[in-house]
């Protein structure tokens, strides 16, 4: 699939309801499998990645029934999972495969987990090694110093052993995999992280009654004196801040009469892109802040002429809190006065593509200078004249495709984004949403 993007001819305007957050959606599905009571899930996104988690829990014994405003998921409880009859296909979804490793590590049956070409290259040692030290048996393909899918998880010969583990990188996927395994271990399983990765699992597992405590960057599941029961009525999945970031950026670079995105998750572990935008001098108004279950949400509003942005530095905790938004922040950097430097983001190398390489290649195709660094990149902004029309190869990465489409709004002619099919993994309605705001993007299949 290819996008043909025309330069924006007018300010953008309108309201778009962004689909449910992908990270929270995965957790709503996987944690509902473990619930002893039916869980009503509202607002689940329609992306293919969440669909992979939905299929996986069905194969493990959950029933998903359509309800007027979402789904009712009847899980198996902690101890009722059944062995799937065929391999679970995790598609493009790193969260599905890594969280399943933790969830399945303590089961008495074996499960095979497979993925697409991109997922089959992604490193799994980060979950396999600590899970193995809990007694889990997980095997995969040896590639270089790492282990890649297909993976076989289990069968566990005996209950898992609790561990106290310090993560080498900030990773919500690794943390969550270990906490899920910790539910099947006897004693206290703790994770300590070097940075503030997203904390949806902690909020949602606690809501379901898991014996979970958080102290700074240390999270503990203590299963002694616990009745091994998770239960809850429901989850409302708020709008995805990572998908929202593309529309926010579009409104900032092209200008907006008024663009409103209601009910976006503003959990502080996810709002690094809003902080980076503020540091660049851009304005995003947060209206009507409120809670949706365990998550804070707000309506995002952008209005005004194309934003006057200045370059900034994104590093340390801010890089962790904006890790999935760095490709679209790079597009804002391309429209900012001066230099933007991204550091401490080596994790970008192992996302759906090598996002340091693909982000820089995307910007260069629009005539923007972008220097590749081992742990990030440096963008020389060009705010005073339009970009040259780009020809982007998204390398199968949804976020590179969408970031390229936004850059195309401020180019001098039509830009083309190749290999954009995987936009469907997180945001199938992206082009429709952009059209609602007044942009012109044509899809060629
Ligand atoms: C995710 C965590 C992040 C993020 C990914 C989704 C999650 O990855 O980049 O898109 O849902 O837990 P890491 O946990 O590997 O940092």
Image (cartoon, grey):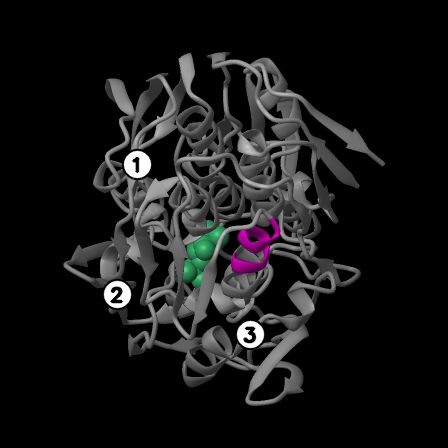
Q: Residue 287 appears at what percent x and percent y?
A: 26, 16
Q: Residues within 10 Å of mark 1 (few under 14, many from 20)?
A: many
In magenta segment, residue 418 = no
Q: Earlier in the sequence, mark 1 or mark 3?
A: 3
Q: Earlier in the sequence, mark 1 or mark 2?
A: 2
Pick whichever, 417 or 425, lies toward us.
417
The answer to whether residue 11 shows anywhere in this view is yes
Q: Earlier in the sequence, mark 2 or mark 3?
A: 3
Residue underneath mark 1: 309
Numbered mark located on residue 123 in the image: 3
- Magenta stretch, residue numbers: 360-365
Tell me if the residue at label 3 has its CB under 8 Å from ligand 1.
Answer: no
Residue underneath mark 2: 224
Ligand 1 shows up in the quarter that is bottom left
Q: Residue furthest front?
A: 385
Q: Is residue 151 above or below residue 49?
A: below
The answer to whether residue 291 shows anywhere in this view is no
Label 1: element kind = strand
Pick whichever, 432 or 403, lies toward us.
403
Residue drawn where x is 56% and y is 55% of the image: 364
In the picture, measured across the screen, residue 119 lies left or right of residue 106, that is right
């Amino acid at each position: 699939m290819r996008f043909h993007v025309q330069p924006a001819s007018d300010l953008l305007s309108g309201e778009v309801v962004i689909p449910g957050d992908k990270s929270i959606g995965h957790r709503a599905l996987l944690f509902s499998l473990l619930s002893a009571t039916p869980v009503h899930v509202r607002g689940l996104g329609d992306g293919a990645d969440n669909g992979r988690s939905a299929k996986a829990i069905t194969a493990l014994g959950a029933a998903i029934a359509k309800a007027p405003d979402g789904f009712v998921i009847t899980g198996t409880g902690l101890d009722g999972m059944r062995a799937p009859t065929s391999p679970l296909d995790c598609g493009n979804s790193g969260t599905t495969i890594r969280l399943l490793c933790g969830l399945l590590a303590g089961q008495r049956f074996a499960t095979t987990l497979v993925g697409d070409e991109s997922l089959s290259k992604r490193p799994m040692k980060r979950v396999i090694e600590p899970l193995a030290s809990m007694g889990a048996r997980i095997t995969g393909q040896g590639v270089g110093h790492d282990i890649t899918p297909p993976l076989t998880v289990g069968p566990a010969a005996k209950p898992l052993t609790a561990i106290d583990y310090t993560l080498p990188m900030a990773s919500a996927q690794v943390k969550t995999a270990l906490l899920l395994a910790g539910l099947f271990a006897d004693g206290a399983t703790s994770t300590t992280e070097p940075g503030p990765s997203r904390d949806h699992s902690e909020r949602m597992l606690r809501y379901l009654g898991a014996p979970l405590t958080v102290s700074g960057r240390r999270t503990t599941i203590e299963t002694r004196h616990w009745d091994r029961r998770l239960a809850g009525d429901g989850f409302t999945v708020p709008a995805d801040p990572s998908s929202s970031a593309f529309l926010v950026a579009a409104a900032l670079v092209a200008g907006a009469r008024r663009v409103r995105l209601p009910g976006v998750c503003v959990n502080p572990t996810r709002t690094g892109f809003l902080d980076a935008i503020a540091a660049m001098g851009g304005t995003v108004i947060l209206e009507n802040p409120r809670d949706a279950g365990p998550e804070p949400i707000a309506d995002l509003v952008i209005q005004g002429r194309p934003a006057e942005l200045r370059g900034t530095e994104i590093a340390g905790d801010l890089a962790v809190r904006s890790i999935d938004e760095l490709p679209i922040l790079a597009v804002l950097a391309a429209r900012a006065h001066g230099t933007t430097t991204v550091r401490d983001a080596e994790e970008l190398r192992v996302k759906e593509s090598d996002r340091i390489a693909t982000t820089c290649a995307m910007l260069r195709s629009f005539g923007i200078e972008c220097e590749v660094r081992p742990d990030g990149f440096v963008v020389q902004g060009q705010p005073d004249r339009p970009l040259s029309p780009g020809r982007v190869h998204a390398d199968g990465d949804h976020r590179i495709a969408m970031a390229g489409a936004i850059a195309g709004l401020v180019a001098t002619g039509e830009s083309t984004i190749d290999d954009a099919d995987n936009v469907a993994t997180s945001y199938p309605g992206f082009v429709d949403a952009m059209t609602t705001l007044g942009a012109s993007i044509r899809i060629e299949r």
